[in-house]
Image (spheres, rainbow, N blue to C red):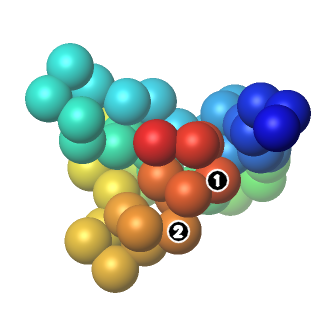
Amino acid sequence: MPKNKTHSGAKKRFKVTGSGKLLREKAGKRHNLEKKASKVTRRMSGTVELAKADNARAKKLLGL
């Protein structure tokens, strides 16, 4: 049987930690930054853990 392919959109969006948790970037920091407050753009920076409800679907797309 052939190997399973990783979903190319998912591999760009999620990072797997050593313990197996999934990390994602926060949304909303791509455009229209001029009209957003600095406080908001700082809050949108960095990575956060993926929601528990989305874990199973993301792992399936990543082939984990």
The residue nearer to you, when weighing 13 against 16, is 16
Q: Amino acid at mark 1?
A: Leu
Q: Position of residue 53 (x, y in %)?
A: 34, 80
Q: Is residue 53 visible?
A: yes
At x 24% / y 41%, what residue is drawn?
A: 21
Under circle 2, the secondary element is helix
Q: Quadrant of residue 52?
A: bottom left
Q: Amino acid at mark 2?
A: Arg
Report whether 25 appears left or right of 6: left
Mark 2 residue crowding within 10 angstroms, few (<14) / some (14–19) / many (20+): few
At x 20% / y 19%, what residue is drawn?
A: 18
At x 82% / y 38%, what residue is drawn?
A: 1
Name the residue tied to disc 2.
Answer: 57
The reply to whether callout 1 and callout 2 are in contact (CB within 8 Å) is: yes
Under circle 1, the secondary element is helix
The residue nearer to you, when weighing 31 against 26, is 26
Mark 1 residue crowding within 10 angstroms, few (<14) / some (14–19) / many (20+): some
Name the residue tied to disc 1.
Answer: 61
At x 52% / y 68%, what residue is drawn?
A: 57
Report whether 23 appears left or right of 20: right
